[in-house]
Image (cartoon, rainbow, N blue to C red):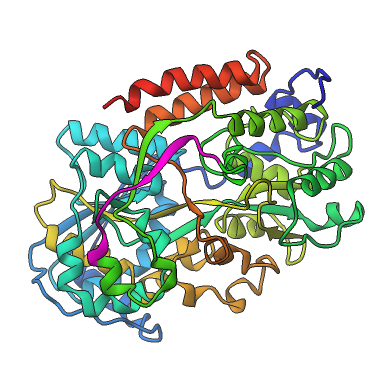
Amino acid sequence: MSDQKRKPYSRRRFIQVAGLGVGAAALTACGDPTATTAPVATTAAATTAAAATTAAVATTAAPAVISGQGKSIKVAILGDQSATALRQPMLAPFLAKYPGATVELMPVPSATWDEFFNKLLAMKAAGNMPDVINVATEGAQLFASKGLTEALDEYVKRDKTELTGYFSDVHPALLEAMMYEGSLYSLPTNWNGANLYYNTKLLGEAGFNSIDPNWTKDQFYEVAKKVTKKDTVYGYQWVNRVWGSWSSWMFTNNSNLLTEEKAPGGDWLWSSQYANDPAAKGRGGGWRWLAPRANDAANVEALEFMVQLYNEGISPSIDLGSGNTLQGIFSAGKIAMTQAGGFWVATLAAQGMTKGSYDVALMPKWKSQRHHFGTAGYMVSKDSKNKDLGWEFVKFTSTNEAMNLDKSVAENRNTPVRRSMMTEARYAANGPKNWKVFYDTLDKFPDTGPIPAPGSYLQMSSIFSKYTGLAMAKEQPVKTALDNMQKELEPLFKK
């Protein structure tokens, strides 16, 4: 462990040193979801012409079990008008099944899932809860534990035959991550594993033409060290948040931020839809996050490794901003390696990275090679007066038809949950050569699991980022920072 002292770079200072200029910040903010926009309502009558354009898309026909006449649902999604536009094309074929129904896509401008969830809780307090909510792993237990969303068990059992194609195409780990105390709350549509992206040119110049899937933490260190060029190119970087940060090193070091346990139940799904799938063996009724273990020795070791990389100039300061900022710096060739999911593919292409200029790899093995992931799908609100139409919408979003029309999935802004959609053709134009890594994250590591996401996720996330920042800024020694993190987390789990 190096004891070299370095003065932390500010975000502005790094951008200047890296030669990006102020334009870099603007570039990475071009998809900023904080812009205020109006909701977009779509009726069946208004989409008749648009529905005709979807005829060439393979459909999974759903029986019209309800009448749409006079029924309306609001669907809350994270983002601005551009996020709404990405999902707009899938409304036409859905509404064609339910004449007279209305679906209103309601963007909630937010920079992060945390901000999005906080705004939804405020809507609930104001009596303005949407009918359907797009929710990521981070919020699944938050909403389910507060009784804000509807368990889908009976709907899934009723429409068992219709959903067989979906479940046979989706890894059971993604469904388990959307369960709470034995019940399923969402049919996930997309997901992202925390994989390692790398700049092929920078690694090639340092003599590394490829990365072995079985590489180790020590080999990672040697690559990162050799690629680094003082104050201009950094071997590795990460963002201070729960997903895809130094938490990845907790997992590969056989640890986690919280103590894990499987909730009982869930056999109603596993024995029905996954009876012959070995990957479903040992699945339960969702994850329980029993108690914090922030200051576990393995976590101290993981964060000390991050501090070492910073001390040695291999990583810049973590106060560079959000994941959007990191995307811009990576695409400019100033960061050689970083964690990200399939959602980076579309953004890197938009920022000028061409086929072959980057690739993806599994996280290196430390004590294990366990990964973590996040997934997302739609949930039906308990407050909805049209839960039946809300369920039909959730069910429709799980079809190949909807996913091929939903540009947030179809354009590689996320990784599709459906294995059949993970093809060479999907990534041929501008995706990574090693695109199979995405689903390998689930297939090769049966113990890969979701990020810790208890009902108290919002408070937990804030505490995690606070003490991570203090440790990386050297305002507190790593062990002290994690001891203090532990003390602040413990009251959240006393119940």
Position of residue 453 in the picture relative to residue 149 (left or right): right
Q: Nearer the viewer, residue 67 or 265?
A: 265
Q: Nearer the viewer, residue 266 or 155?
A: 266
Residue visible at 32% across and 46% down in the picture? 140
Residue visible at 84% across and 53% down in the picture? 203
328 magenta-colored:
no
Q: Position of residue 130 (x, y in %)?
A: 21, 47
Instruction: Determine whether 346 is above or below 96 in the image.
Output: above
Q: Which residues are magenta?
A: 255-268
Instruction: Determine whether 76 is above or below 97 in the image.
Output: above
Q: Nearer the viewer, residue 216 or 282?
A: 282
Q: Is residue 468 visible?
A: yes
Residue visible at 63% across and 14% down in the picture? 476
Q: Position of residue 122 (x, y in %)?
A: 25, 31
Quadrant in the rendering for residue 428: bottom right
Quadrant in the rendering for residue 84: bottom left
